[in-house]
Amino acid sequence: MRITGQMLKKVHELSYKYANLPERYVNRAKAQVFWKTPNEPNYQEKVMEKKKYRFTMNRPWSGQFRQQNMPRTLRKKVFVEPIAEWSFFRGDRVEILVGKDKGKQGIVKQLIPERNWVVVEGLNCHMRKVGADGDYPGVFVKSEAPLLVTNQVALVDPADLQATEIEWRFTEEGDKVRVSTRSGRIIPLPKEQEETFDYKTKKTYLEREKDTVAKVVEEITFKPTLQTFEMEIMKEMGIQEERVPKKSFWY
């Protein structure tokens, strides 16, 4: 089954992880609300918003993504093949299977899972013209073009440094790992897969003055109860409500 790129609605979980931002913030940044009912009790809540997005190299929380998805923007239709389980991560060594760099190996430096893309550092490059304005001709910049993980790149087996297909299996300890179908060797996840927009690895991140300390995050300070906020305050302060509320009716 194939679905059109115009039908894509959700941001991939790896993109949320790389953004290192709350999911609700990313969704709010990419949302385009055309109209919604006033926030009043006599209105039924309805929202008219854009539901189909065209994902590109620009990340969903950026201004460039919003600009590329503005209404009446004519873009060529694309096709994305659904992938049940994503198997490529930052830092993986892959081999290019097509194009002028066919047979070369490189390191994955960026993921665009919404389009089944990976960007390999220093390979599959092209020149693009930027900065042209009036009489100024602009300059050419070398940049890496994305590659499809379905048929344009393959993971490299660490046993013999050859391209291989992989499948996910479970070890005796219950850990989920990638295994080369040719050699049976485990392909470990690279350390770079922890990389986010803020840091390369968790250990190298320096806590700032306004950061919440990890010790505080792990501490559970909230205990859910079947009480309203007012009821909890009254219980803490020992207040007993003896008044009988008047009956009210809603038609």
Image: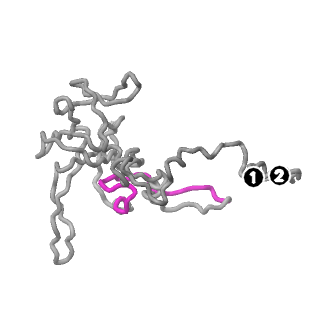
Counting from the top left corner in percent of width and height, residue 213 is at 50, 51
* Residue, far bottom: 135
Is 50 colored magenta in this rendering?
A: yes
Amino acid tagged 2: Ile
Q: Earlier in the sequence, mark 1 or mark 2?
A: 1
Residue 46 image position (x, y, % from top left): 56, 56
Residue located beneath label 1 in the image: 233
Q: Is residue 80 visible?
A: no
**Is residue 224 a member of the stretch shown in magenta?**
no
Type of amino acid under label 1: Ile
Front residue of this view, candidates 11 and 236? 236
CB-based contact (under 8 Å), mark 1 and mark 2: yes
Q: Residue at x 34, y 52 (%)?
A: 55
Q: Quadrant of residue 44?
A: bottom right
SS under mark 2 = loop
Q: Is residue 39 left or right of residue 84?
A: right
Where does the magenta region start and end? 42-65
Within the image, what quadrant is residue 147 found in?
top left
Secondary structure predominantly adopted by residues drawn in magenta: loop
Q: Residue 70: where, in percent of width, then height? A: 38, 62
Tell me the residue at 38%/21% (across/down).
172
Tell me the crowding category of disc 1: few under 14, some 14 to 19, or many 20 or more residues within 10 angstroms, Cα based.
few
User: Which quarter of the rendered picture does the N terminus lie within?
Assistant: top left
Residue linked to disc 2: 239
Q: Residue at (74%, 49%) from the top-left corner?
A: 232
Separation of residues labelled 1 and 2 (CA atoms): 8 Å
- Does residue 156 appear to the left or right of 7 in the view shown? left
> In the rendered image of this protein, does residue 91 appear above or below residue 198?
above
Q: Residues within 10 Å of mark 2 (few under 14, many from 20)?
A: few
